[in-house]
Amino acid sequence: MTFENDEKRREYFLEKLCEKLNDPEFRKIKGFPIGEDEDIMALSDPPYYTACPNP
């Protein structure tokens, strides 16, 4: 995938991460952090790094 800039890339993948965070099965993955969605998203730079298992 290509994006206009890093901000557009970040917006796209943060939206995808947000969708996954709403999936209860995703939260059952071993190693999933205890925390608020906003905190996980703030610490993440998907697709390169996520503060939870990388979907």
Image (cartoon, rainbow, N blue to C red):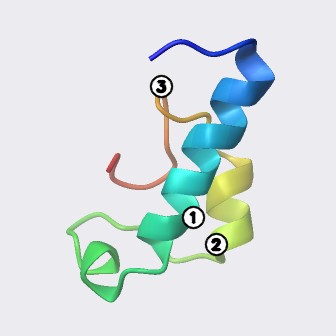
Which residue is at 66% across, 77% downward? Answer: 36
Q: What element carries label 3?
A: loop
Residue 1 appears in which quarter of the rendering? top left
Which residue is at 73% across, 17% downward? Answer: 6
Disc with the residue nearer the chain's start (2 vs 1): 1
Q: Where is residue 46 in the image (x, y as percent from the top left)?
A: 53, 35
Q: Where is residue 35 in the image (x, y as percent from the top left)?
A: 60, 76
Q: Position of residue 22 (x, y in %)?
A: 48, 80
The numbered mark at residue 18 is 1
Q: Is mark 2 on a helix, strand or loop?
A: helix
Amino acid type, callout 1: Cys
Mark 3 surroundings within 10 Å by alpha-carbon count, few (fewer than 14), some (14 through 19), many (20 or more):
few
Q: Which residue extends farthest bottom?
A: 24
Lateral position of residue 44 relative to residue 22, left or right: right
Number of labelled discs? 3
Q: Mark 2 points at which residue?
A: 37
Q: Are marks 2 and 1 in contact (CB under 8 Å)?
A: yes
Which residue is at 71% across, 40% downward? Answer: 11
Closer to the eye: label 2 or 1: 1
Q: Distance between the residues labelled 3 and 2?
A: 18 Å
Q: How far apart are marks 2 and 1 (CA)?
A: 8 Å
Q: How far apart are marks 1 and 3 (CA)?
A: 15 Å
Out of 51 and 12, give the one closest to the viewer: 12
